[in-house]
Amino acid sequence: MAEDFQIGPLNHVGIAVPDITEAIETYKTIYGATDITTPFDMPEQGVKVCFVNLPNSQIELIEPLNEASPIHNFIQKNPKGGQHHVCFEVRDIHEAVEEMGKRGATVLNEPRIGAHGTPIIFVHPKNSNGVLIELMETPKGDH
Ligand code: CO
């Protein structure tokens, strides 16, 4: 089944922000977004997260919880925030890990449960034109 491995739908674009409350206000007041989830902490990942729900996709807003956060350095370099990653859905995370290896891409973490409650991995930006790629198993019952 692996030769036909391919990424599926764009699930979300991850934006790192210094202040998630301000970022939510921006999406509401400038862009008119009305469907925005309540921010929640993911302490194991060192981030606070919420989603701006759009008709065809989501924007994931990510604020570092503390200086140990993996996105703390990103915010240091980009004080106003910036695009952090792009997330595509895959049918099976273990197949994705195996295929990334076979295809010469560097997977940055063991599969772990992401903000949507399904397993995710990150692929090194050096393999994708400088863009950090998240691969996320499609939630069961979706699509
Ligand atoms: Co993400």
Image: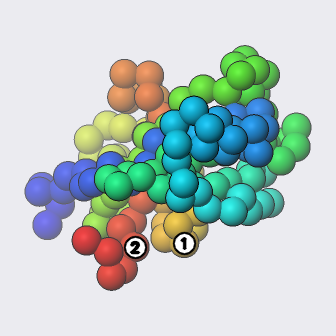
> Circle 2 is placed at which residue position?
139
79 in relation to 141, above or below: above
- The x, y position of residue 138, in whole percent, is 36, 68
Q: Residue furthest right?
A: 67
Q: Nearer the viewer, residue 12 or 54?
A: 54
Residue 34 is drawn in which quadrant? Answer: bottom right
Q: Secondary structure at mark 2?
A: loop
Q: Is residue 14 left or right of residue 130?
A: right
What's the residue at 60%, 26% (across, down)? 82
- The x, y position of residue 24, in whole percent, is 67, 44
Q: Mark 2 vs mark 1: which is more N-terminal? A: 1
- Mark 1, other Cα within 10 Å: few <14 / some 14–19 / many ≥20: few
Residue 95 is at least partly visible in this image: yes
Q: Residue furthest top?
A: 77
Q: Nearer the viewer, residue 39 or 83?
A: 39
Q: Secondary structure at mark 1?
A: loop
Callouts 2 and 1 close, C-beta under 8 Å: yes
98 in relation to 17, above or below: below
24 in relation to 42, above or below: above
Q: Quadrant of the N terminus?
A: bottom left
What's the residue at 73%, 62% (across, down)? 40
Q: Is residue 36 left or right of residue 71?
A: left
> Mark 1: which amino acid?
Gly
> Circle 1 is placed at which residue position?
117
- Mark 2, other Cα within 10 Å: few <14 / some 14–19 / many ≥20: some
Chosen colour scheme: rainbow
Residue 123 is at least partly visible in this image: no
- The x, y position of residue 31, in whole percent, is 51, 37
Calculate the distance from the C-alpha at mark 2 to the C-alpha at mark 1. 8 Å
> Mark 2: which amino acid?
Pro
Residue 26 is drawn in which quadrant? Answer: top right
Mark carried by residue 19: none
